[in-house]
Image (cartoon, rainbow, N blue to C red):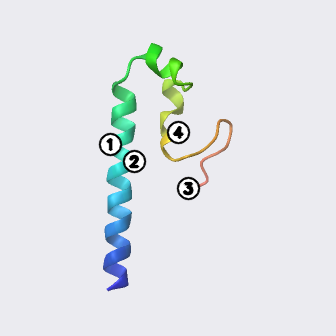
Amino acid sequence: MSIMRTAYRSFRDYRVHRMAERTLAAMDDAFLRDIGISRSEIGMVVRGLQRGQEDKAG
């Protein structure tokens, strides 16, 4: 049962991150600048990484 729970949580987390990425990507550059991120940082921000930190996940 725990394998199914883990798989579900992984899928749910993926969906949440993907939705956040799409929401941020739909915003214009001026609004992104107002909230302190650039378009190229959207993926890092969604994954919770700080600027300049490498994504170790691959």
Q: CA distance from mark 4 to mark 1?
A: 13 Å
Is disc 2 surrounded by few (<14), some (14 to 19) or many (20+) residues within 10 Å? some
Q: Secondary structure at mark 3?
A: loop
Q: Earlier in the sequence, mark 2 or mark 3?
A: 2
Q: Which residue is mark 1?
A: 19
Q: Which residue is mark 4?
A: 45
Q: CA distance from mark 1 to mark 2?
A: 5 Å
> Which residue is painted at 60% across and 44% down in the image?
49
- Kind of residue sitting beneath label 3: Ala
| Discs 1, 2 touching: Cβ within 8 Å | yes
Q: Position of residue 58 (x, y in %)?
A: 55, 53
Q: Nearer the viewer, residue 39 or 58?
A: 39
Q: Earlier in the sequence, mark 1 or mark 3?
A: 1
Outermost residue on the right side: it is: 52
Q: CA distance from mark 1 to mark 3?
A: 19 Å
Q: Which residue is mark 2?
A: 17
> Which residue is painted at 37% across and 54% down in the image?
14
Q: Quadrant of residue 24?
A: top left
Mark 4 or 3, which is nearer the eye?
Answer: 4
Q: Which residue is mark 3?
A: 57
